[in-house]
């Protein structure tokens, strides 16, 4: 294990904003991680575990030890005629992992194609897209308890997954996810094409009986047409969670804004944050170095490449204020703010 000092974190966040870590190390195995935690304890440093950097916004330097998780490896265990357990180490790129599963005809994750980030951070916020969340295929994950230094296994129930939420999100810093295991199908796949955009994309592809490979291609095409590539334009994907409000509040908004969309979420209504932002006049709007994406208002971008994290944060605050003023809805940032 090699500890470096005063290292730029710009290469390690998809917003591409400048921030420095007082101490920095790259980890490839569990013993190195335990050594890093011992170093942090000895020097009384907070620890920040970094994955693909796709869900984080640095508004300041990090006065602690940043640990970049580089653990690699994918393993498979067949459990019956139609199911396989596939395990990805924390440092595996999420999209590459999903693509490898789709290529082997393992179904369950195809709707989550092209989501940026690494496998180890996927359970943190129960990543989801187009009607699928990782909890739908999640089996268990192995974690390191940063307080006891012991390895633990979390089941689906242990993770307490909710909409963009999990046990880990509520206990930030206590656990570092080392690997994630999914229970996938090998032939009798349950295809999720309920989202209209997927059905439309499949229709454009002239596909009436889709395979999981077809769905993955459709999802990739949709995301590429609507979302900016973080390698080209700095962003963290969806910046805000879709708000969930009481049905009575939604009825009041519907009477005032007949076109406002809403989807049942248990006893409440989920409203697309992108719709609220767009109809508040923020879609494609730029202030200084920061803007919302022209094709997807839910995505905030580092428009010039020179934005600071504080500029992006303040820009998002103005969006929150406008939506609250117009609709009485409080948007919540999905991105982890440092």
Image (cartoon, rainbow, N blue to C red):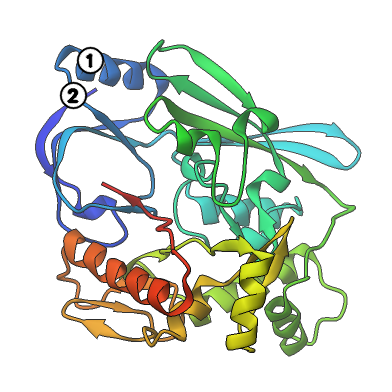
Of all residues shown, which one is farthest toward the left? 6
Whole-percent x and y of residue 58?
Answer: 23, 52
Whole-percent x and y of residue 242?
Answer: 54, 64
Asked if residue 233 lies left or right of residue 226, the reply is left
Whole-percent x and y of residue 218?
Answer: 67, 75
Image quadrant in which you'd find residue 166: top right
Residue on which the image places disc 2: 45
Instruction: For marks 1 and 2, give the CA distance.
Output: 6 Å
Residue 211: image tag: none
Whole-percent x and y of residue 198?
Answer: 71, 76
Is residue 68 in view from this perspective?
yes
Secondary structure at badge 2 equals loop
Mark 2 Cα-neighbour bin, 10 Å: few <14, some 14–19, many ≥20 = some
Who's the residue at 76% across and 80% down the image? 199
Who's the residue at 49% across and 34% down the image? 168
| Residue 274 higher or lower than 182, as above or below | below
Asked if residue 324 lies left or right of residue 5, the reply is right
Viewer-proximal residue among 47 and 231: 47
Viewer-proximal residue among 172 and 197: 172
| Residue 18 higher or lower than 233, as above or below | above
Secondary structure at badge 1 equals helix
Mark 1 Cα-neighbour bin, 10 Å: few <14, some 14–19, many ≥20 = some
Image quadrant where one finds the N terminus: top left
**Marks 1,2: beta carbons within 8 A:** yes
Asked if residue 219 lies left or right of residue 169, the reply is right
Residue on which the image places disc 1: 41
Asked if residue 269 lies left or right of residue 306, the reply is right
Who's the residue at 18% across and 24% down the image? 45
């Amino acid at each position: 294990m090699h500890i470096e000092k005063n290292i730029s974190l710009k290469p390690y966040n998809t917003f591409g904003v400048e921030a420095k870590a007082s101490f920095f190390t790259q980890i490839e195995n569990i013993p190195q991680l335990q050594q890093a935690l011992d170093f942090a304890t000895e020097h009384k440093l907070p620890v920040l575990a970094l994955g693909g950097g796709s869900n984080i916004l640095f508004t300041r330097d990090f006065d602690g030890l940043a640990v970049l998780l580089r653990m690699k490896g994918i393993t498979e265990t067949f459990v019956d005629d139609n199911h396989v357990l596939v395990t990805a180490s924390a440092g595996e790129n999420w999209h590459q992992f999903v693509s490898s599963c789709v290529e082997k005809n393992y179904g369950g994750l195809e709707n989550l194609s092209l989501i940026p980030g690494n496998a180890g951070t996927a359970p943190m916020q129960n990543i989801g897209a187009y009607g699928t969340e990782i909890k739908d295929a999640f089996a268990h994950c192995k974690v390191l308890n940063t307080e006891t230094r012991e390895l633990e296994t979390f089941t689906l129930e242990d993770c307490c997954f909710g909409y963009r939420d999990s046990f880990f999100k509520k206990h930030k810093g206590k656990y570092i996810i080392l690997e994630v295991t999914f229970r996938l199908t090998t032939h009798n796949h349950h295809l999720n094409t309920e989202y209209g955009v997927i059905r439309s994309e499949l229709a454009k592809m002239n596909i009436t009986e889709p395979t999981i490979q077809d769905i993955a291609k459709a999802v990739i095409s949709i995301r590429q047409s609507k979302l900016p590539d973080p390698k080209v334009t700095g962003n963290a994907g969806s910046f805000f969670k879709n708000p969930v409000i009481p049905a009575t509040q939604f009825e009041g908004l519907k009477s005032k804004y007949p076109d406002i969309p809403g989807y049942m979420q248990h006893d409440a209504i989920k409203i697309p944050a992108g719709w609220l932002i767009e109809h508040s006049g923020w879609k494609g709007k730029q202030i200084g170095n920061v803007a919302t994406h022209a094709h997807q208002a839910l995505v905030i971008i580092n428009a010039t490449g020179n934005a600071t994290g504080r500029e992006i944060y303040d820009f998002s605050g103005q969006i929150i204020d406008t939506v609250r003023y117009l609709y009485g809805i409080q948007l919540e940032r999905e991105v982890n703010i440092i």
